[in-house]
Image (cartoon, grey):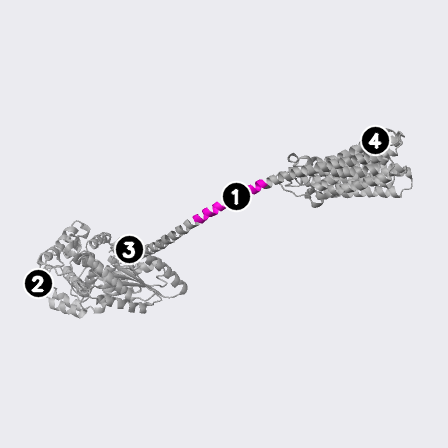
Amino acid sequence: MGAVRCGLGLVALNLILVLLLAFIPSAALRESISNCGGIVIPLIAAACCLKLGRTASASRLSGIKYVPAILAGSAVCYALGTVSYSVETMVLHLPGNPGFCDLFYLLQYGFFIWALCLWPSKPLPGAMRWRSWSDALVLLITVMAFGWVWLVGPAIKDADASSLAILIDAAYPTADILLIFSMLQMMRRGFDSRFRIATYLVLVALTFNTLGDVYYAITQMDGIYVAGNWMDATWPITASAAVLAGLVARVKMMSPGFIEARNDQSILLSQRTWSLYTPYVLVPAVGLLVVHVARNENSPLVRNGLYYIGVALVVAILIRQLIAITENGALYKELREAYDELELKNLQISRAANDSETMNFKLRIMADELAGQNRSLTESNEMLEQMATRDGMTGLANHRALQERLRDDVALARRQGHPLVLALVDVDFFKQYNDHYGHPAGDEVLRSIAKLLQESIRQGDLAARYGGEEFALLLPYVDRHEATIILERLREAVSTFPFPHRRVTLSIGVCHLCEEFDLPEKLLDFADKALYAAKSRGRNQIAFASELGPPAGGTANQETFDLSSPMGYGQMISAGLQYNPQALAHEPQCALIAGLLATLELRDPLTRGNSLRVMWFALRLAHQAIEQKKLKFSVSAIRSLAFGALLHDIGRIGIKETVLSSIEPFTQEERHEIERHPAIGRDLINRFPALSCALPYIENHHERWDGRGYPNKLKGDAIPVGARILTYADAYNAMSMDRPYASKKSHSEIRAEFKELAGKQFDPGLLDAFLAIADQEWDTLRNGIKTDFTYKSAA
């Protein structure tokens, strides 16, 4: 904005000066105004340019950084010349030409030429610079020829002044010729486009200066020049335009990110077509000028001077031709070298192409080999995937695949709202099967069951080996009724399958997706609990997690217990086995009993759940006998009976494993071994004084009413009454469950056997109490027992 304001101010001042010089009638006043304008306007212009100071990037620029100051210096020189002219003519009354003012005026031309030489232009290669200067020499000589004929020669020829005056008069047109030459040379080189406006202002300044000088020279030669003419304003306009050009250039150089374009030898810049033919066009023009002068000019000075200039022009043309020939030779040499280099590169490219073809052939072979390896790798990956997700022996999905599929199916079922069922399947007495018939036979059983599983499910269902002898079935889009049909068909198929050695059955625990069981972990957990319930109820059956309930119509985890009845006391004992804090407050021995039972189950998995069932059966029979007034039991006696029922088989810990795992009827030797367990149990519990109340029942629960039992051959009333109750409960538990060597019996069969053995094995006085308990109540006791206690083993 500062440059614009300065420009507008200078335009206004020059316009005012022109108007004053054109319309003021007084010649003396016009001369004074002309002198004042020639002093004030250039000085103001120079001050506008110089007040911006040094450019921010001046230290990184070359000569162009001096251009604004040089143009400002030209304006100052003109102002000083006008001051000197005014003093000499108006104060000292000396003639204005020649004088000291000419020194400043001519010095102004030197500043102009200096600025044009430093003016920013496009970079040129070195070879083109020499040709450019030769063309410039031709152009200079041509301009000097026309200037000599029309300006310089006539000024010298017609001058009556001293030699100094003649020299000074000739110096002005000569300086104008040099300015015109410098201007044309600048245009030929091509100026920097960033300084376009500044360049146009310089051209305007030089044009006005030349017009003013030509007008002055012509009027001086004709003797009609008068100071104060409006044409005198051309020189202040010249100073103003030159300084504005410097100001615009300075602003451009001060702009952020300005970087000077430097000459670069690698730049190939072609000259304009018209500039190539300019020297050859100028020669005929000068020739025509020589012919014209020879015919029409009588002055030997003008003619001889023109002849010398013509000779100089011919010499300049010859020099240009020599430079052009040298340049063409250098270009031809470079072209030949480039051609040779191109040929070499073509040869290298040809060799590289041949090498590439060979490499491509090898790569194709390698690609074929890689494709083969990829196929092998794909097959290997498929095999690995099979191994990672499939059970190696049965071919079913493995535990990992089941977990992943279960997570996905649960998420999908919850999102879409369709039913989903998870079933855990366990092979009954599989450990005994392995022990008696060998692991190969057991493996064959697992493979056969896996095949039956696959045949029983639908497409989209998943059968998996969950671990050991356990399998899992995942049945999406199946409700409970449909799941029961599928699983019953599977259970029946396995139980009727002709296995080589003996019949094999399945226990199945089922859990379906619902609000209570809404996570994969819960489905697995409660399906496992349902499986355990199925095994506890006698195996070879299906149990649903939704049907698991508290034993004997009560809740084992209830906060209060009715200790006035055997069933209420049984609830408290069951809760204690689960480490219920309120129950343990009454019976801290429950934690000890739970540890002993866990040890027994690790030793003999067949006892899993037996102890708790026998306790409930014994307490129920005792409760019935109390109601029928056949017995009187105190709370202490009920407690002793409950502990004795839980620990009645604890002596099996000391029995040989081969005897415990036998699924055939005992031999005489095995029978002697198994009959040791009451005595072993007595000796073991003797070490725990807190459990001593259970000793009579542990030791005597295998005594018979007729005295043929063991270990002490006790008879009749000599057998503790609690042991007699325990004999009923233990026998009922055995007969109502599937065993490896015998299937479970119906209620009618069990009642008939008790009637037959009453007075022999069983106390006849308790028979009526047993028979008074409904079959449905016995089933409720057996099926409703919770088995998810802390002593539950991993088996």
Q: CA distance from mark 4 to mark 2?
A: 169 Å
Q: Which callout, 4 or 2, points at the residue further toward the start of the chain?
A: 4
What amino acid does circle 3 point to? Answer: Asn
| Residue at the farthest bottom position | 748
Q: Which callout, 3 or 1, points at the residue further toward the start of the chain?
A: 1
The residue that disc 2 covers is: 706
Lateral position of residue 389 relative to residue 9, left or right: left
Q: Which callout, 3 or 2, points at the residue further toward the start of the chain?
A: 3
Q: Residues within 10 Å of mark 2 (few under 14, many from 20)?
A: some
Q: Are marks 1 and 4 in contact (CB under 8 Å)?
A: no
Q: CA distance from mark 1 to mark 4?
A: 65 Å
Lateral position of residue 359 relative to residue 285, left or right: left
The residue that disc 4 covers is: 167
Q: Are marks 1 and 2 in contact (CB under 8 Å)?
A: no
Question: Is-magenta flag for residue 358?
Answer: yes
Q: Which label sits in the foreground, 1 or 2?
A: 1
Q: Which callout, 4 or 3, points at the residue further toward the start of the chain?
A: 4
Q: Which label sits in the foreground, 1 or 4?
A: 1
Which span of residues is magenta-colored?
A: 336-359
Q: Nearer the viewer, residue 267 or 561?
A: 267
Local SS, label 1: helix
Residue 342 seen in the figure: yes
Image quarter hosting the C terminus: bottom left
Q: Which label sits in the foreground, 3 or 1?
A: 1
Residue 269 pos. (x, y %): 65, 42
Q: CA distance from mark 4 to mark 3?
A: 132 Å
What amino acid does circle 1 point to? Answer: Lys
What amino acid does circle 4 point to? Answer: Leu
Q: CA distance from mark 3 to mark 2?
A: 42 Å
What amino acid does circle 2 point to? Answer: Asp
Image quarter hosting the N terminus: top right
Q: Are marks 3 and 2 in contact (CB under 8 Å)?
A: no
